Image (cartoon, rainbow, N blue to C red):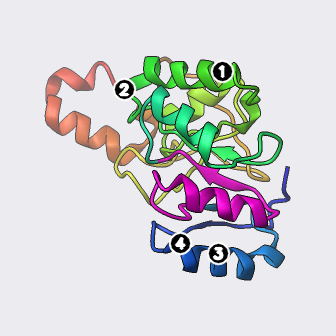
Amino acid sequence: MPDAGHLAVDAIYSYTSTSSIEAADALAPLGLWWFEDICDPLDFETLGTVAARYAGPIAAGEALFSAAEAKLLDRYAGLRRARDILLFDPVHCYGLPGYLEIIEVLEARSWPRTAFWPHGGHLFCLHVVAALGLGGAEVNPLCFQPFGGYGDDMRVLVGATEPPTVPGIGFELKRDLRHIFEALLGDEASGRL
């Protein structure tokens, strides 16, 4: 596991097949947690070319949504099971059943559960990681608001936290989100939240 001083780079598909190699070469000495969004998510040839020359971890799968796409990623992208990160989003993968199918398909192809880091940046992903024994969760507390991030009083220490010990997912631990639910549900919410 990389130390907390490292960073992850999210390129937002801005690289071409040529510039992705240039970026990988420039980023290689920096010791990043991972290099993500190297190219179009279905450009497995470019991803494989970068994986063949970039020694650090590569993260992929965030913009792929089915077990069939996961198989193609595994078969053609040149990813390394002992090093690379799979960022499939449980919400976008046809929900938790679709996400579980992706895990089952890739586990059968020798991917360890520790390679799975669900993309999403919200409490649901934290619960998925804890329940399924996955490697971790990709979290950006500034994205996906008002659902993004964790409960207001939850603390992240050395890059880790635990799911809240409350019924449900824990969205009610986010004051801003709680106020939105109360406004939408009116008096009916006051007794339940």
| Labelled disc at residue 132 | 1
Q: Nearer the viewer, mark 4 or mark 1?
A: 4
Q: Rounded to the nearest whole Å, what is the CA distance between mark 4 and mark 2? A: 30 Å
Question: Are circles 3 and 1 on residues that touch, CB within 8 Å?
Answer: no
Query: Which of the two residues, 137 or 28, is positioned nearer the viewer here?
Result: 28
Name the residue rendered at 69%, 56% in the picture: 58
- Which stretch did the figure color magenta? 37-62
Instruction: Find residue 34 and report its image quarter.
Output: bottom right
Left/right of residue 189 with respect to residue 126 in the rendered view: left
Give the label, 2 or 1, closer to the camera.
2
Kind of element beneath mark 4: helix
Q: Report if the CB atoms under discs 4 and 3 are less than 8 Å apart.
A: yes
Q: Look at label 3 and name its amino acid.
A: Ile
Where in the figure is residue 85, as x and y percent of width and height?
68, 46
Q: Secondary structure at mark 1?
A: helix
| Amino acid type assigned to the residue bearing label 4 in the image | Ser
In the rendered structure, which amino acid carries the disc numbered 1? Leu
Q: Is residue 46 magenta?
A: yes
Residue 90: which disc? none
- Image location (x, y in percent) of residue 134: 70, 30
The mark found on residue 17 in the picture is: 4
| Residue 78 in picture, x, y percent from top left | 69, 49
Residue 94's label in the rendered image is: 2
**Badge 2 element:** loop
- Is residue 83 shown above or below 134? below
